[in-house]
Image (cartoon, rainbow, N blue to C red):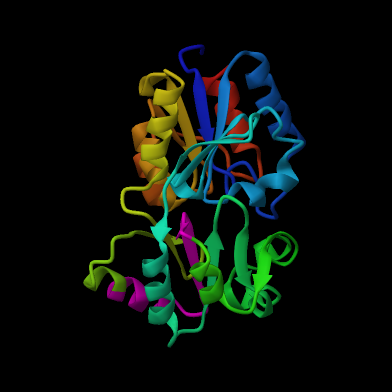
Amino acid sequence: MDGYDLIALDMDGTLLTSDKRVLAETARDIDAAAAAGKTLAFCTGRCVPEMVQYAEPFRAIRYAVSMSGAVITDLFENRSLYAVGIGRDLVLDILAMLAPYDVMVHFLTEEASYVRGDQAYRIADYHMGAYFHLFTQIARHTDDMAAVAARLDYVPKINLYFRYMDDCRAVRGQMEARGLPLTITYTEGPGLELSPPGASKGESLRRLADLLHIPMERVVAVGDGDNDVSMLRAAGLGVAMGNAAPAVKAAADAVVADNDHNGAGEAIRRFML
């Protein structure tokens, strides 16, 4: 089918296998789409510095809608096309609210991601063991997240990883009860993803399509998580991975194989080539 010009691909649970590898066939399918003149974009919760280790297999992907829509980057020109964030005062307020809880705070910015160094090596305690390499080798370590926040004007995205789901739900309830100006979604395990108001993969995918003068009906989006639903609904064709939750599949127009069996490549072959 040649009716689609842009494909937006989530990373974790979509382009990457369960153990965070890139299948050779996935890389080949991406290269084939680029060779056919299609435009490819990441649409991920990660920040760009967290994607560096995948630069070679994904070298044909030019654009990144990162941090769940807070930032859009032209990777070929190393140029920001759009950015928004959670202001410093609110970030410090959030950190104060979290003081009673056993939670790992993760800041994502255009330059780096930040975590407490002592928690990085205990990431399995927070149900995120699959990301051990990312947090121990790629993230910047600090002893004081508040000190990091104090020197930043804004943080595009904050991830919170809890040891206990009850704590996760309690914090979300407190934030919503206070009416904090945030977009809040559940992430893997007992975790929360905090973004600026209105920031979503769907809205920023629309922004990118507008910048590229591509109508949304000619856009395909592929994902597996709750934060992918907005882009699946925004795109002309929303594709859910086989490993996606039932609610994500219900929001999609099509379902492909799971992330350990090149579902992303299947979407490329079926709908872009």
Q: Quick check: can you spot residue 17?
A: no
* Towards the viewer: 139 or 18: 139
Residue at x 55% of width, y 19% of height = 272
Q: Position of residue 25 (x, y in %)?
A: 73, 32
Answer with the quarter of the image where residue 23 lies: top right
Residue at x 74% of width, y 35% of height = 57
Magenta span covers which residues? 153-174
Residue 178 higher or lower than 182, as above or below: below
- Along the horizontal axis of the image, is 198 left or right of 50? left
Residue with the most extreme bottom position: 100
Q: Position of residue 38 (x, y in %)?
A: 57, 18
Residue 84 higher or lower than 177, as above or below: above
Residue at x 44% of width, y 76% of height = 95
Q: Where is residue 174 in the image (x, y as percent from the top left)?
A: 29, 76
Answer with the quarter of the image where residue 238 lies: top left
* Towards the viewer: 23 or 131: 131
**If the image is split into quadrants, where does the C terminus sit?**
top right
- Residue 172 in the magenta stretch? The answer is yes
Residue at x 61% of width, y 65% of height = 114
